[in-house]
Image: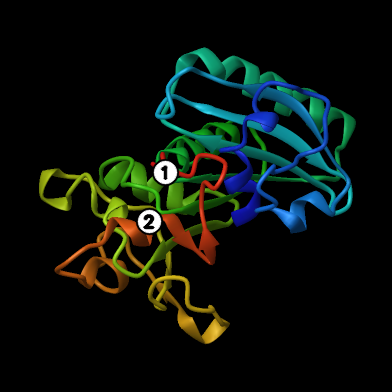
Amino acid sequence: MKQYADAAYCQENNNSPGDKVSCHFNNCPLVQAENTKTIAEFENSLLTDVTGFVAVDYTNNLTIVSFRGSASVRTRSRVLEAIRSTAARNPGFRIAITGHSLGGAIASLAAAELRNNGYNVDLYTFGAPRVGDDALSTYITNQAGGNYRVTHYNDPVPRVPPMLVGYAHISPEYYISTPDLAPVTTADIRVCPGIRNSDCNGAWPIMDILAHTQYFDIMGLCYPLLNV
């Protein structure tokens, strides 16, 4: 899922529906090796506005929604319609929603809405900020479908907005404990439950924004100077 999240940074997946998912920096080789096709693509002018795609992975029987940027009501109806039509044509396919950073925040909200519409959705986020209060975080945590909220070392983005002003996270957290771009094994990933846990990423007193760009490898190579 990390490579699908990364692919949302690549413009070729944002403005040409019907093509295979690809990354011009070759930073999503596992995705490029699969039989994929984008069903809907959406692009906005600002890197922080919502951009991404809906795709079908025929190799793994998956429907993928990948986001970059923050929420925008302009894309909501397009995403929902693409999911409806794709699910109708591929009834046995799982649905997975993913996103990095602000894209992880909108992915979380999109997963909650699709689940409310009767879809079984798995959620994968990387370096996502907190998206709501205790009630919302608990609600999304308890919905049917898997939640995989991945954080890395001392990445500062999962620490905002702060818990002191009422924000909480979806549980559980999957914490990558290796620094920088060191190789990651299963032993390096800790599972930290709780919507307000202060372990794992939350235990760091000093943060480093570079950790936000390092999830197994470098995120956002299609925008090498603008990783958010």
Tell me: 97 left or right of 112.
Answer: right
- At label 1, counting other C-alpha atoms closer than 10 Å, the crowd grade (few under 14, some 14-19, many 20 or more) is some
**Residue shown at 39%/49% (left/top)?**
128
Spot the residue most to the left: 164
Q: What residue type is labelled 1?
A: Asn
> Looking at the picture, does residue 28 appear above or below residue 111?
below
**Residue shown at 82%/30% (left/top)?**
19
Q: Where is residue 79 in the image (x, y as percent from the top left)?
A: 63, 23
Whole-number angstrom distance, CA of label 2 to CA of label 1: 8 Å
Mark number, residue 227: 1
**Count of marks, rendered view:** 2
Circles 2 and 1: CB atoms closer than 8 Å:
yes
Question: Can residue 1 be seen by looking at this rendering?
Answer: no
> Looking at the picture, does residue 226 appear above or below residue 50?
below
Viewer-nearest residue: 78 or 142: 78
Q: Where is residue 102 in the image (x, y as percent from the top left)?
A: 40, 39
Q: Which amino acid does label 2 sit on?
A: His
Q: Position of residue 202 (x, y in %)?
A: 24, 66
Point out the image quarter for the C terminus. Answer: top left
Viewer-nearest residue: 212 or 200: 212
